[in-house]
Amino acid sequence: MQSLDLQPTKDNLEKTLKVDAIGRNKDIAIFVNLLCNIKAPFSVAINGNWGSGKTFFIKQTSIVLDLLSKNNSELNIEDIPNMQSLQKKKNEFSSIYYDAWKNDNDCDPILSILFTICHEYKKQSPRNRDIKKGG
């Protein structure tokens, strides 16, 4: 039996951002605008039933945030429908996706969170590969 679930691969995430078949891009734009305008430390919780699209929403938000912070992608913010409000917005932070389910069996969750942050930082900042030296 063939699965009807669309897996959150990079291609599927970008393709669904470009097509916006279910009209989610407006919600992503509102969420990104909120994230870019908050000045103090904060936490955000995304709640929804299993299969409601939380992972897709967060990973697509991450793509949009990364597009706003750097221009070295094949995808441009102008290529995404309903993102007009973000076209002139730039941010100076990077997104890091942490999969809590994937790391659910870790003995010490803080270590896997820190590992993920360090690993992604090294990938995103090629000039600062050695984190120990502090840049």
Image: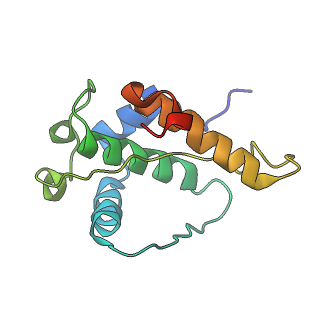
Residue found 67% across the figure and 41% down from its top: 115
Residue found 21% across the figure and 34% down from its top: 76
Residue found 39% across the figure and 76% down from its top: 40
**Front residue of this view, candidates 133 and 55:** 133
Quarter of the view holding residue 63: top left
- Along the horizontal axis of the image, is 95 left or right of 17? right
The residue furthest left is 88
Residue 125, x across and y down, in percent: 40, 32
Quarter of the view holding residue 41: bottom left
Up-down: is 13 above or below 103? Answer: above
Q: Is residue 7 at least partly visible in the picture? A: no
Residue 2, x across and y down, in percent: 68, 27
**Front residue of this view, candidates 81 and 118:** 118
Residue 37, x across and y down, in percent: 27, 70
**Front residue of this view, candidates 122 and 80:** 122
Up-down: is 2 above or below 45? Answer: above
- Along the horizontal axis of the image, is 50 left or right of 75? right
Residue found 38% across the figure and 38% down from its top: 16
- Quarter of the image where the N terminus is located: top right
- Quarter of the image where the C terminus is located: top left
**Front residue of this view, candidates 5 and 112:** 112
Number of numbered tags placed on the structure image: 0
Up-down: is 119 above or below 100? Answer: above
Residue 90, x across and y down, in percent: 19, 51
